[in-house]
Every structure is written in structure tokens, then in C-alpha cells.
Amino acid sequence: MSDELKHFGILAHSAEGAALCFTTFCHEGGARLGPDLHPDVTVDCIAFGRCMDAWDKGDYAFIRNVLGQSVSTLAKAGADFWACPDNTCHLALELEGPAYDIPGLNIADVVASEAKSQGMKKVGVLGTRFTMEGAAYKRALAAQGIERAVPSDKDRAEIDRIVFEELVRGKFLDSSKAFYAGVIEKLKGEGCDGVAMVCTEIPILLDGVETALPTLDSTRLLAKAALDVATGAAPMPLWRGGPVQIAA
């Protein structure tokens, strides 16, 4: 059976989100293929602390190069394709540069496609300050005819603080759950009909939390999309990093 399946590579940047992507892929594989079965999967993680200074300076070219090293490692390990569950990374991954060794799934496109399939018209974006203010979800949601919204400046700052001071370190506090739920309530008041949880750790924080709007779990959606590719239920991706080509 393994010869019929594609080997999936996870390009990890932060541990919590990558772990959720990995476990979701494996558990969903068992549900589809039988107990304890899933396509081969390899994870490569270069500590994201090596890139934090570059993030703060806006040096996305440096980050793109670091991420490319991970893709090369995954390719050498036998991966047929890769995906990065860290949404913020896509600001660097979509930067112009050399094509990566193997193709990858783009998490923003996976999330935007799901939003469209659910009939959403205006989606609030929750993630790091880089993701909320960056171009990846502007592009992906607009390509599906969906309006994008973000929280206020003050709320974005607190969302970002919680991500970097708590979530990426495995801290999921009740006070932060309440704050995020309150932000989603505000987005509903601004006309949103859905919210994209596009920091890999936010779905962990909000597991079991009742929210005012339907949520799009970017991490689990990506893992399931990768499983579709690995099992042949979806075609291999074509993107190898760089600007995403919008179909005419």
C-alpha cells in the first residue's frame, strides 16, 4: 500500500502548531486507511528563534532561505510534497526567489477555499501581527471573492502578544480564551460571517470554546488537505514557493 501513497513533509516553524498538523494527519489517516495506518510523514523544524530578528526587521528573504533549507531536508528524506502549518511563514514563502525542491500546499489557499465552500462572504483574520497585516490572506480570500477583515489595532497587538508570549510556549490561559472569544464577537458585529484561525496555535487555544462565529481551523484543514494529496484524493500541488499565480 505504501507505494501507492505520497510521502508528506511538514515544514515546521513553531512546535505546537506543527505537532497539531502532524497528529491530525496521522489520526485522519487512520480513519481513512484503517487503524494505525497513514501515509509516510516527515517533520523538519529549524528553531523559529533563528528568524525572529528577521521577522521584526521585515527581512523576509532571510526567512525564505531558512525555510528553503527545511524543504530541501524534507526532499532528501523522501517527501514528495510539503506544507507549512505556520501561516505567517507564507509571507516569506510567497516572496520571489528560487523554486523549492518539491511542491507545496499553500495554507492560505486551503483556508480560503474552505471559506468559499461554506458560503462565507466576509471573514475575520486572527493570527500574528504579521499575518493579520500581511498580504497572504488578502490575496487568498480576494481570489475567492471573499472580503477580509481584521481586528482593531489594539486588539491586534494583544492577539500578537498572546501568540508569542503564551501560545507558542504551550500556555493556553482561560483569560486569553475569553479575550479571543470577545474579539470574534466584535468581528461579528462588523459583519463577518466567519473567522479564520490562521495562527497554528489558535485552534488549540479555542478548542471547546463557544464562539460567536463559525471558525476555520487552518492547521487541521491543512493536514486534511495534505492527506487528500497523499492518498490520491487530490492532485499534487504545483506551487514551489514564490508568488501565487491567480487563475484567470
Image (cartoon, grey):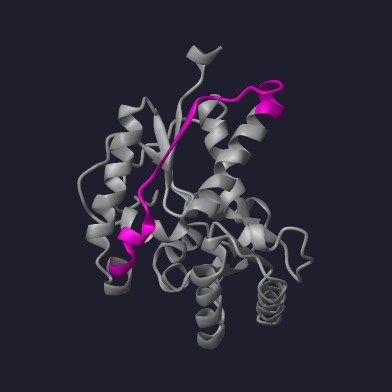
Along the line of sight, the residue nearer the viewer: 230 or 168:
168
Q: Is residue 88 left or right of residue 53?
A: right
Residue 19 lies, in percent from the top left, at 55, 46
**Which quadrant of the view contains residue 11?**
top left
Which residue extends farthest bottom? 154
Foreground: 169 or 93?
A: 169
Residue 224 location in percent, x, y? 60, 39
Q: Residue furthest left?
A: 98
Residue 171 percent location from the top left of the image:
61, 65
Image vertical order of residue 6 relative to residue 197, above or below: above
Tally of marks: 0
Task: Name the residue: 70% across, 79% down.
Answer: 182
Camera-side residue: 144 or 8?
Answer: 8
The answer to whether 96 is drawn above or below residue 227 in the figure is below
The span picked out in magenta is 30-53
> For residue 119, which quarter of the picture?
bottom right
Residue depicted at x 50% and y 82% = 157
Q: Is residue 215 magenta?
A: no
Residue at 60% across / 62% down in the picture? 202
Q: Write the residue at 72% across / 62% down.
A: 214
Image coordinates of residue 57 in percent, x first then y, are 27, 73
Q: Is residue 141 left or right of residue 61?
A: right
16 sits left or right of 238 in the view: right
- The quarter of the rendered structure image containing the N terminus is top right
Residue 84 horizontal side relative to residue 174, left or right:
left
Residue 236 against residue 5 in the figure, above or below: below
